[in-house]
Image (spheres, rainbow, N blue to C red):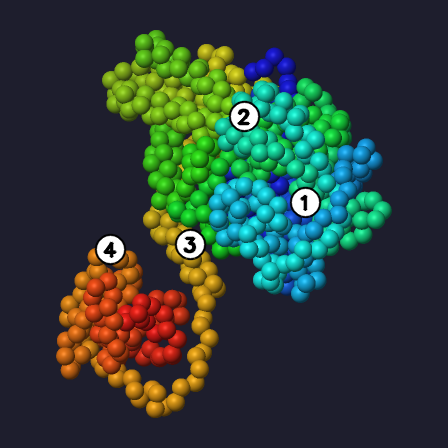
Amino acid sequence: MRNSPKRFTITAALPYTNGPVHIGHLAGVYVPADIYSRFQRIQGNDVAFVCGSDEHGVPITLKAKKEGITPQQVVDKYHAIIKQSFQDFGITFDNYSRTSAKIHHDTASEFFKKLYEDGKFIEQTTEQFYDKEANQFLADRFIVGTCPKCGFEESYGDQCESCGTSHNATDLINPKSSITGNTPSLKETKHWFLPLDQYEPWLKEWIVKGHKKDWKANVYGQCKSWIDDGLRPRAVTRDLDWGIPVPIDGADGKVLYVWFDAPIGYISATKEWAEREGKDWEPYWKDQDTKMLHFIGKDNIVFHCIIFPSMLKAEGTYILPDNVPANEFLNLEGNKISTSKNWAVWLHEYLEEFPNQQDVLRYVLTANAPETKDNDFTWSDFQARNNNELVAIFGNFINRVVVLTNKFYDGVVPEPSTLSEEDVKTLAELKLYPSVIESSIERYRFREAQAELMKVARLGNKYLADEEPWKTIKTDEERTKTVMYLSLQIASVLAVLSEPFLPFTSKKLRKILDVTPSAVEGSLQWNDVSTKDIILPPGHTIGKGELLFSKIEDTQITAQLAKLEQSKKENEAANRVVDAQKDTCSFDDFTKLDLRVGTIIEAKKMAKTKKLLVLKVDTGIDVRTIVSGIAESFSAEEVIGKKVTVLVNLAPRALRGVDSEGMILMTETPDGKLVFVNPDTSTSLSTSEDGVNNGMTIN
């Protein structure tokens, strides 16, 4: 433990209130921030851990338009869901606020006016995108186009979600309005800009030449790249009707740009907390002895390392962040998590479907944290880590220790006799873990820190397995007492060291061992593990056992995978483009088509193609070759013997050197599955076409 308490201001990225929180948010920001905050509190430090709902972003207005409700209704709905989810999940914010709160509007307005009055802004009339049909200027998220850096065709006007590059909307190639789909025009408008170019020398000194090389490589590298490329003035206002009105004359119809407004939310959240708790907020933002940290995802690096520090520097009275431990992205079952496509594991739904299993998700997300690269969450890994690690290692050790103590000694910690060499070695090893875990946490290596915690559980399991007290109780009672005494010390260490990572488990284990919470004066503390020879004294009585973790069954995982599959189908259906009806044809035109029922008698995959099968079809009048583009839906083996409807009088056409002499008719079911049109089905035909030349399908 440090000699004297230290003050920490810890912020977690403000989530947009256009949807619930998902596992990507948790893994990237909120779980690591909570581990760090819990750890600092355990150390006796003064912590202000703040966050809040970001309610002024353009995604909110887009969601409102989509759902046909007001932006205020959107933020009220999702703010309540998000706040409750965080609370139920055990994220220990000292204050979770919202940017629609009066204290935030006042704080952001005062911050803007201070910079405006100090001459820190430049006023410019520039051309910005305008949608004539919608009769409005287009904020960055109202514009999509091709990223000028990576070529991603659905980049937003301010940032590409594919490569992470930030840019101006006018940099996009083929920009389109996301409101109407029209190509926007350019129209003059007046705005206020923060001249980032004027802060470039200072940023270079502070980040590149300064001590910031201890920042994560991805953070430092992105900052250096931005600075090396040269910074440009960035607008702090926007032409919108949703947000904080620009608090000066001559700015009617303009609001503070969300990137300027949102980070000030950390300050207003701290003010709100301090006012409620009877504290002074200023030391947490203006005292050089305070350590300030921003936990964010990699898409927010530029805002928290370049723009927000420049704002604080311009204001002149605030401290700067000591570190910005940004994580990479977490994917889901091999695909990018997407709110709009419902490809996500939502926190509020997880809490309903896996009740009282918050720590399982915390454990898996930390074990697979995207600390240095994008990682992937899979339900099979979730199940395996729970069953093979939490249940089989951690839970199994605790259960055996508690059951045996109650069985042998009525729950009373026995008096040890002479310690063996292995006992002494084990106790010495236990004392090392707090400093090892602390070192990893202080370097923001939470995955590594949690792995060290699990080593304690493995140590306990191995010790029990080697000593076999269930056998020695019959032959050496004194040795058994020593083994159980030492095993209980290991269990107590787990109760203490698991608190930042598995808080619900730690609380449950402290209850079983009858050890008071760490926040209580005189209770078992983190520092006790490394300084005390006896953690759980002889004569202390523990409680009865209960399972810390439960096995997750295959049926639970199957249900989650089915849920994702349903989301995929619904998204595909929503985005499926249905061809318009073709021009009317006469009955005489239709009678020219010679349709026959045939049987597929041979089939093989065409080499070096993904879609094509080469079929031999007995049409009743002959056996002919037909090339059909169905290989992604059917294997060659499963189509042999199928009855099919064939258009036999279609002119032959060569495909990859094979003459195709007809067309197999096919259609899609409502859920998008490709099926044959044949006399054994009631499938109806329409005349829209989709497929590969003579292997064409009819939908």
Q: Is residue 458 visible?
A: yes
Q: Which residue position is annotated with label 3?
A: 564
Furthest residue in direction right, as rendered: 249
Q: Earlier in the sequence, mark 1 or mark 3?
A: 1
- Circle 2 SS class: loop
Q: Gap in Å between the C-alphas at discs 4 and 3? A: 32 Å
Amino acid type shown at disc 4 = Lys
Q: Gap in Å between the C-alphas at discs 4 and 1? A: 50 Å
Q: Quadrant of residue 686?
A: bottom left
In the rendered view, tell whether residue 193 sits above or below residue 488: below
Disc 1 vs disc 2: Cβ atoms closer than 8 Å?
A: no
Q: Quadrant of the C terminus?
A: bottom left
Disc on res. 550: none
Q: Along the line of sight, which residue is nearer the eye, 105 or 131?
A: 131
Q: Gap in Å between the C-alphas at discs 1 and 3? A: 32 Å
Disc 4 vs disc 3: Cβ atoms closer than 8 Å?
A: no
Q: Is residue 60 left or right of residue 379?
A: right
- Residue drawn at 38 percent across, 21 percent down: 487
Furthest residue in direction bottom, as rendered: 588
Amino acid type shown at disc 3 = Leu
Q: Which residue position is annotated with label 2?
A: 215
Q: Which residue position is annotated with label 4?
A: 608
